């Protein structure tokens, strides 16, 4: 039986202030008094302090976790692990240390109840009273079970279509899979700890930030929703090809070092896929969209009672809710959650305040985007680079970071960026409000084509965000063009399956029926099943039809005050101007898409073979 000598510990509470630091100090003093070497890492709202290095962990004989929030345990694989709450660590520190040491001794001797033989590295978790239970190795070579998460900025089509693609891909490879979907309505089909525990691998197909901390010790593969939709089986195979943490320790020290190296490389690859300004922008947009849709539709409903409702009327009340409240939050929320994506919680306060300031300065959505990036990177810099004495660390998340980062961002917006960005936005607004027909048609062509390039992906979202941002500046024509162009691809393909059935197989013909419903609802993703199967013919046809629809909408002078709703907004009086010609623009764009795709698509092989068979049957009768 080996007696542990070196201990590493992590303490964490929701604020990262009192309980975190008190538990850390209690563990440090008690362990040293008992003759152990110890290093304690603290985690809180201002990030990680006194961080444990790979060398610290590798040299440790035991890990103690004293936390009231989730702590990522990936890096502690192969080490005896003992977990308690911070309050238990503070009240009964000596017992915590002694129980942790005892559990580690039992494990090293191979006698711990429920543990497997060899250095498999079980994790021990104690309840608040200090009792512990062993966590059995969940490895089961015959389980063939996977879990996954899909998420896109709106949480509508891409989220669910990626989930379906993963299900089909897993089924084709002989695996069962459960996929949790995350979107604007929250998480659905949520994964349980038991399901995660028995999964062979985890697949994350997301275009926004997804918390992966609950998947510690699992093969984890991250990709985009588009990749999952295009090649579900390939994504599943990539996930299964990731290094297996459960078998990494079998090779002894060398095996563990190799595993740690592979984990570091995998995390670096995943970080590269996750990071980047556009990913931060999409995260901000995903939080902003529900506010835009709710506020915009409420504003549209207020127009039922006239464009200028009387004070105190129901129309005025609706305008107060949608225009003066919901729309007032658009820029702050966009800015706040861009900063949140960059710096986590420390970025939220300066991001929200910077966004409100940008709105008050007349910088619009451009200022919101700028303030979000400024707040995120400034807060991250303050968190990582400014160090305080240990007894003052508790002030950092509640005073130092929000104060300094908000001051820096606010002063930069007021004295440096405010006037130029406002001038750019004012110029853009004036240009859009006063542009001639030629410029309007060109803008409609560009926005319309962008809506069909990736059908709900980054280019589509860029065009949509541009149009939505202009609503707050009382520029409504681009919103009409974008919605018309977004409805055209699924409607055009649905029409094509009716007028040229021989160009589509039975699955596509059935998908056409669904696409028609999605199309009138302004869900461009209804065209994705067709594009995924034959992108080089379908996507150009969709771009052509959407560009025509967007250009005609601008040419006809159509404007739209609601950011979503599809054809159903026509039922709201005053929500759309020149509604008759708007329907004409959508119809012509739909027809262009249908005609182009029927000309580009080849006749399906099974259709040709069936026609040949029919001809063979008919020939004898003709003779």
Image (spheres, helix red, strand yellow):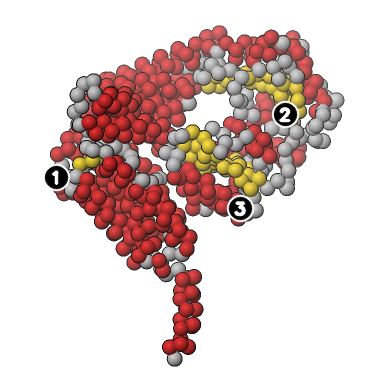
Residue that protrudes farthest toward the bottom in the picture: 623
* Mark linked to residue 10: none
Q: Earlier in the sequence, mark 3 or mark 1?
A: 3
- Distance of label 3 from label 1 (alpha carbons): 55 Å
Q: Which residue is mark 3?
A: 171
Task: Classify mark 2: residues with Cα within 10 Å, few (<14), some (14-19) or many (20+).
Answer: many
Q: Is residue 470 visible?
A: no
SS class of the residue under badge 2? Answer: strand
How packed mark 1 is, by other alpha carbons closer than 10 Å (few <14, some 14-19, many 20 or more), is: few
Secondary structure under the numbered disc 1 in the rendered image: loop
Q: Is residue 533 above or below residue 15?
A: below
**Residue 436's mark?**
1
Q: Is residue 373 above or below residue 612?
A: above
- Using residue 481 as the reference point, say whether residue 200 is left or right of it: right
What residue lies at 19% left-to-right and 31% top-to-bottom? 307
Q: Using the image, determine if residue 390 lies above or below residue 546.
A: above
Nearest to the eye among marks 3 and 1: give it: 3
Residue 416 appears left or right of 124: left
Picture residue at 75% right of the left edge, 19% below the top: 131
Mark 3 and mark 1 in contact? Answer it, CB < 8 Å.
Answer: no
Above or below: residue 546 compared with residue 610: above
Residue 591 position by quadrant: bottom left
Q: Earlier in the sequence, mark 2 or mark 3?
A: 2
Residue 47 seen in render: yes
Task: Kindly indicate whether the residue at mark 2 contacts the one at mark 1 (C-beta within 8 angstroms).
Answer: no
Q: Name the mark on residue 123.
A: 2
Q: Earlier in the sequence, mark 1 or mark 2?
A: 2
């Amino acid at each position: 039986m080996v007696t542990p000598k070196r201990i590493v510990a992590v303490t964490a509470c929701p604020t990262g202030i009192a309980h975190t630091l008190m538990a850390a100090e209690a563990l440090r003093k008690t362990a040293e008094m008992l003759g152990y070497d110890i290093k304690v890492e603290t985690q809180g709202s201002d990030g990680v302090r006194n961080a444990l290095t790979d060398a610290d962990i590798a040299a440790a004989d035991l890990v103690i976790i004293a936390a009231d929030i989730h702590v990522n345990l990936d890096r502690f694989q192969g080490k005896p692990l003992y977990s308690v709450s911070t309050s238990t660590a503070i009240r009964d520190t000596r017992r915590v240390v002694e129980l942790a040491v005892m559990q580690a001794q039992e494990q090293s001797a191979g006698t711990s109840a429920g543990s497997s033989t060899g250095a498999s590295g079980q994790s021990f978790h104690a309840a608040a009273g200090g009792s512990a239970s062993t966590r059995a190795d969940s490895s089961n070579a015959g389980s063939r079970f996977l879990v996954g998460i899909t998420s896109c900025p709106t949480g509508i089509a891409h989220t669910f279509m990626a989930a379906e693609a993963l299900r089909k891909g897993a089924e084709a490879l002989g695996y069962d899979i459960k996929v949790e979907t995350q979107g604007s309505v929250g998480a659905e089909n949520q994964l349980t700890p038991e399901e995660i525990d028995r999964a062979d691998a985890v697949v994350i197909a997301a275009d926004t930030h997804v918390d992966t901390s609950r998947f510690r010790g699992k093969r984890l593969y991250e990709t985009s929703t588009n990749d999952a939709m295009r090649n579900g089986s390939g994504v599943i195979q990539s996930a299964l090809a990731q290094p297996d943490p459960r078998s990494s320790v079998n090779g002894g020290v060398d095996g563990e070092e190799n595993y740690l190296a592979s984990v570091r490389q995998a995390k670096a690859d995943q970080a590269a896929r996750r990071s980047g300004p556009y990913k931060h922008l999409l995260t901000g947009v995903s939080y902003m969209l529900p506010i835009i849709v709710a506020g915009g539709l409420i504003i549209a409903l207020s127009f039922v009672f006239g464009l200028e409702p009387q004070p105190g009327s129901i129309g005025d009340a609706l305008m107060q809710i949608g225009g003066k409240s919901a729309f007032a939050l658009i820029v702050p929320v966009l800015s706040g959650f861009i900063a949140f994506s960059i710096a986590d919680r420390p970025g939220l306060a300066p991001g929200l305040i910077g966004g409100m300031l940008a709105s008050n300065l007349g910088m619009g959505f451009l200022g919101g985007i700028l303030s979000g990036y400024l707040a995120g990177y400034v807060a991250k810099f303050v968190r990582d680079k400014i160090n305080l004495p240990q007894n003052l660390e508790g002030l950092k998340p509640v005073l130092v970071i929000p104060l300094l980062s908000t001051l820096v961002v606010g002063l930069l917006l007021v004295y440096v960026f405010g006037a130029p960005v406002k001038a750019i936005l004012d110029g853009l607004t004036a240009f859009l409000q006063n542009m001639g027909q030629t410029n309007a048609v060109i803008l409609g062509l560009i926005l319309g084509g962008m809506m069909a390039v990736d059908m709900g992906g980054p280019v589509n979202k860029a065009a949509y965000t541009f149009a939505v941002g202009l609503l707050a500046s009382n520029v409504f024509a681009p919103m009409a063009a974008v919605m018309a162009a977004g409805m055209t691809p699924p409607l055009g393909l649905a029409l094509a399956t009716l007028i040229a059935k021989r160009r589509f197989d039975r699955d596509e013909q059935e998908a056409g029926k669904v696409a028609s419903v999605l199309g009138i609802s302004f869900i461009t993703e209804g065209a994705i099943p067709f594009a995924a199967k034959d992108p080089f013919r379908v996507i150009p046809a969709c771009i052509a039809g959407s560009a025509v629809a967007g250009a005609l909408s601008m040419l006809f002078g159509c404007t739209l005050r609601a950011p979503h709703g599809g054809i159903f907004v026509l039922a709201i009086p005053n929500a759309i101007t020149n509604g008759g010609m708007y329907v004409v623009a959508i119809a012509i764009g739909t027809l262009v898409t249908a005609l182009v795709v029927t000309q580009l698509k080849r006749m399906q092989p099974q259709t040709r073979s069936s026609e040949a068979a029919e001809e063979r049957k008919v020939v004898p009768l003709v003779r």
